[in-house]
Each structure stands twice: as C-alpha cells, then as structure tokens.
Amino acid sequence: MATEVANEEGYLQQRQRYTTVRVYDALLHDRDEHGDLRPKGWLYEMGIPVCPTGDPWDVEIMQKVPVNLERNSVSETYLRSVRVYTLNHMHDRLRPEDAATPAVQDALTDKRIEKAAVETVLIHQYGAKRAIYDPSDTEANHRLVAEGFKIIHGGAYSKEAWENIRISDAARPSGQILPTPKPYSEDPNAPMRELLPESEWTPGMRNVADYAIALGQRLMGAKIRVLIDKGGMNGHAACYGMGELTFALKTLGRAYFDRGATESLNQLLIHEFAHHYGDSHLGDDFHKGLEKMGARMVTVALTEPELFKRHGWKEEAER
C-alpha cells in the first residue's frame, strides 16, 4: 500500500509498504432519494478521519496515508487501491445491496481484483443463473430467460470491468451456455453443403418444390428458390433465409417428397416461412410471422382450393 516516508533530508517520499488495514461497518449513514438509509464510509489514518468515501464500510489504514496539502482527500488511484484490496478480502461479507455501489463497481474495473470477488459481485447483482447477452444467438437469450436466467447487457459494465469478468469466467454469453441448434456448422473448416442437382430430383421433389414456390408467392409475396441438401443439416428438416428454402434429404427421406401437399409439409412450410419475419423461435417477430402464415393459408385454401389438390393433397391422407 502506498505511504509517505521521510528521507534522510526529512522530505516525504512515497513508498510501497505492507500494512494492516482494518475494515468496519460504516458508522455514518445518509438518506438516499428514496428516503432509505445508506452507509457513508470514511477513510481513516490510524484512527484519524481523513475523508469521506461514501463506501459501504469505514477503512482504517495503519500507516501514513498520502493526502493532499489540505489533508482532506486522497487521489483516485489510492482510493481505488483501498477499494480493491478491501473487496478482495471482504467480498464474502458483501451485502447484495452494496454490490452496485460506486466503491464495488470501481474495484471491479481494476486488474488486481480477484476471481472470487468478481464472482461474488455478479451473484449479488444477477444471481447464480446469469448470462451475457449474445447478439450472435438471440434465441439463446430468450431460451435462458425462459429458464430463469438473468441476461447481462453490454451497457451494464465498463470495458475494464467486462475484461475482468471475462478473465474470471464469472459470466458467459448465452450462445455458449445454451447454443441454438443450427442447420449448418459455423466452423469455417466444416465441409461445404452438398446440394442435390435438379437433374436428379424425383417427380415428387419437383412437385414439392413447385408447391413451396407457389405458397411462398401467396403467403409472403416473395419469389423463393428451393434447394435440396443431401445431408441431414444437423437434424433439421429444412431451413429458410435470404429467399432460399432448403430441404434436408437425409432428415426427411426420399419418400417424404412423394406424399404431396400433406399436413406435415404445410406445417413445415408455415414454420420456415415465418422466419421471413424473424430468426428467433422465441422472438415476437417470428410469432407474428406464424400468425400471418396461418391466416393467409386459410385465405389461400378458401380462394384457391385447387392449388392444394393440384399438388397432391388428399383428405384421407391426413387422417
């Protein structure tokens, strides 16, 4: 801890020395804007009050404290050192209501803060079930909220505090905790998808593709392209994005395409076309997209019933 020591000529010079630091519950309190009592800590030098800190505790330094000429304040650097060392040793006694105080948040930005202290602060602020908002996997954020997690957004902490949180592994992005299954790997070294050439499509595949294109035009007002991937797309039956609808041959099987406009196919198309409005399955845009697809499907069925029969729909096949 920094202190001041007289040299041979009697001039005070700063030195770093080990010392005893005593921590007490703050003796003084102030009322906040809500009328609640809040601690108003002070910094002491061997029993002599130096300056108020507003921290949750009173801290007594058992050696000379480097102060200004008026002896009524210390530097921000010195105060941060006091806060960091205090939090590192006293975090297990930290009260939940004190975790968001300037003293604790200031200490959270310092590289000297210990992993256990960071963990304690985040538990008090966000609980044991917490995750960092992941813009690359918005659905994971929604799914974790549904499981009782609290999501920490980027503006909650400063750049320096986030770096300490990352190093301490005190919180992880939602996509790392509960990644959303995707039809294709995001690994740049993963093998490329292998599409089935249209020249090898069966009549059933062509029929399903034509049906999907017709529905896409009527339900979304969009001209889509239909592809068939030879693989299983990580267990997905299909995926839609950027005007492309891709069926997974390995997942669906060849016989699936010979059944025509079945209820199963209609359900799959409604689901995939809803992604025209939102990516996340738990997002409001996706849910509204489902509503639009369902309502417009009814309209198409009432105004163009021949479309469904032309592509193989049979009432008895759905029973």
Image: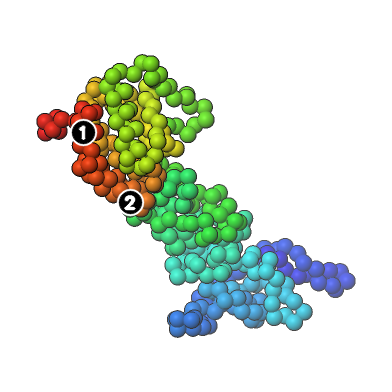
Quarter-of-image position of residue 259:
top left
Where is 12 relative to 116, above or below?
below
Q: Does dot 1 land on a helix, a strand or a loop?
A: helix
As rendered, which of 51 and 33 lies closer to the eye? 33
Against 278, is 157 above or below? below
Q: For this rendering, which residue is in front, 314 or 264?
A: 314
* Residue name at image x 27 percent, y 45 percent: 296
Q: Position of residue 5 (x, y in %)?
A: 78, 69
Left or right? Give the position of 4 relative to 283.
right
Say which residue appears at 84% left-offset and 69% top-offset.
7
Q: Residue at x 47, y 59 (%)?
A: 122
Return the residue found at the far right: 9
The residue that mark 2 highlights is: 288
Amino acid beneath label 1: Glu
Q: Residues within 10 Å of mark 2 (few under 14, many from 20)?
A: some
Residue 296 visible in the shown view: yes
Viewport quadrant of the C terminus: top left
Quadrant the N terminus occupies: bottom right
Mark sitting earlier along the chain (1/2): 2
In this orientation, does residue 113 appear? no
> Residue 91: percent from the left, percent from the top?
50, 63
Quadrant position of residue 84: bottom right
Image height of 278 relative to 213, above or below: below
Horizontal relation, residue 163 to residue 178: left or right: right
Residue at image point 43% right, 48% down: 138
| Camera-nearest label, 1 or 2 | 1
The image shows residue 301 at horizontal and vertical percentages of 21, 40
Q: CA distance from mark 1 to mark 2?
A: 27 Å
Q: Which mark is residue 306?
A: 1
291 or 210: nearer the viewer: 210
Image mark for residue 193 = none
